Image: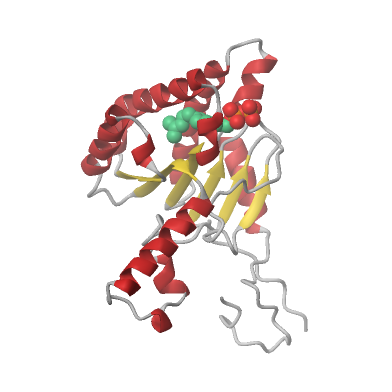
Amino acid sequence: MNKPPQTSAAPPRHVAIIMDGNGRWAARRGLPRAAGHREGGKAVRRTIEAAIEHGVEWLTLFAFSSENWHRPQSEVSDLTRLLRRYLRSELKELEQGGIKLRVIGERDRFGPRLRAELAAAEERTRNNTKFNLVIALSYGSRAELVTAARRVAEAARAGQLDPATLDEASFAGYLATSGMPDPDLVIRTSGEQRLSNFLLWQAAYAELIFVEALWPDFGAAHFAAALADYAGRERRFGVRPTTDTAEPGGAHH
Ligand code: FPP
């Protein structure tokens, strides 16, 4: 008798999202790009609510890539201003809603005001345990991997690490995402089908879902549809069961 394929009945524990399409959303309305980013901020709030409702534990949002620094200075300042405003207006809700905020990426490239507000927001939500919100800011996977490699080399040079003992689990501890579960599902909006240097190590076995909607239009219904799509996927983690009598639980990592 053939076993049905193993599909994921449980919701993804960690969803990561590449929020794309703010600029196009604004352009279609004849509005400045900043208006698209502002509207994108509202989609962030809707998505956090939807993720909590569906029992997701971790949500990572790609808000600003290492490459975004090459955008015009005015757009970079619009984005950083929006982030500061977001932190200021939402912090109380994050705090009271049991949401723990963590920021990954090269935060030192931002100015002192945003850095201070990020640190304060992380500090104030440090003991929250209901939900984890991770914002990737000035983040790029290759830079993250190079930083990790440098730290490994430094630890080895200092005699704190025997290179022969380094394995995938211990290497992951040198990444910005240390201690976080890998994303089970990566969603990208706006119809683009690329990872764009986002969580390349961590998303090794993630399901990928590409949504046509532009990020400012993304909402609870899109999130639910992505989770339904995910639930129907057969996750094998690189292992294909060869016989019907394969041990349950054998198809991992
Ligand atoms: C991609 O659209 C979006 C961004 C570069 C910024 C995302 C930022 C937000 C949604 C602001 C709020 C974020 C948080 C975490 C509060 P794009 O500008 O690349 O759009 P385009 O591809 O249509 O030009």
Q: Is residue 66 above or below residue 203?
A: above
In this rendering, does residue 45 appear at all?
no
Q: Give coordinates of residue 178: x percent, y percent.
A: 38, 60
- Locate the C terminus by quadrant: bottom right
In this rendering, does residue 40 appear at all?
yes
What residue is drawn where x is 56% and y is 36%? 19
Task: In this rendered view, identify the residue nearer to me: 126 or 5.
Answer: 126
What residue is drawn where x is 39% and y is 22%? 81
Q: Quick check: 58 left or right of 91?
A: right
Residue most toward the top? 30
Q: Quick check: 122 left or right of 69?
A: left
Q: Is residue 124 above or below residue 231?
A: above
Q: Give coordinates of residue 38: x percent, y percent.
A: 49, 21
Q: Quick check: 93 left or right of 221?
A: left
Task: In this rendered view, identify the residue nearer to me: 200 or 48.
Answer: 200
Q: Quick check: 51 left or right of 230?
A: left
Instruction: Find ligand 1 in the image and state its quadrant.
Output: top right
Residue most toward the front? 157
Looking at the image, how many numbered discs can be counted on the residues? 0
Q: Which colour scheme is used?
A: secondary structure
Task: In this rendered view, identify the residue nearer to me: 61 or 10.
Answer: 61
Task: In this rendered view, identify the residue nearer to me: 237 or 79.
Answer: 79
What residue is drawn where x is 21% and y is 40%? 124
- Locate the N terminus by quadrant: bottom right
Q: Where is residue 85, by image quadrant?
A: top left
Q: Give coordinates of residue 216: x percent, y percent.
A: 58, 26
Q: Give coordinates of residue 156: x percent, y percent.
A: 34, 74
What residue is drawn where x is 53% and y is 33%? 68
Q: Where is residue 52, by image quadrant?
A: top left
